[in-house]
Image (cartoon, helix red, strand yellow):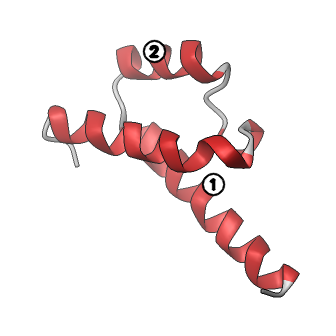
Amino acid sequence: MKTETLDKIREFRYNKLQELLDKCSDGSKDKFKRMYGTLNANEMPDDKIDWAIQQCENTLRKFNMF
């Protein structure tokens, strides 16, 4: 793939994670920060983004917020 396409995909993933994090409760955000060291999606390594998105989606589903 072209670098431009990969950059767009990466940006979409980071934006999606940040959107999900913004919907999480303060308690969930605290837990996320303990696990990943940050609440800023742009500071996360690429190899952790997909799993972090899944965790946020599962958390929001659990509390019927997704």
Could you tell whether 25 is left or right of 21 in the image?
left
Q: Quadrant of the N terminus?
A: bottom right
Could you tell whether 41 is left or right of 28 in the image?
right
Label placed on residue 31: 2
Which residue is labeled 1 in the image? 14
- Residue 14 vertical placement versus 29 (above, below): below
At which x and y percent is residue 35? 56, 18
Could you tell whether 59 is left or right of 42 in the image?
left
Q: Amino acid at mark 2?
A: Lys
Q: Amino acid at mark 1?
A: Tyr
Q: Label 1's element?
A: helix
Crowd rating for badge 2 (residues with CA inside 10 Å; few <14, some 14–19, many 20+)? few
At which x and y percent is residue 63? 16, 32
Label placed on residue 45: none
Q: Residue at x 83, y 87 (%)?
A: 2
At which x and y percent is residue 18? 55, 46
Could you tell whether 42 is left or right of 18 in the image?
right
Number of labelled discs? 2
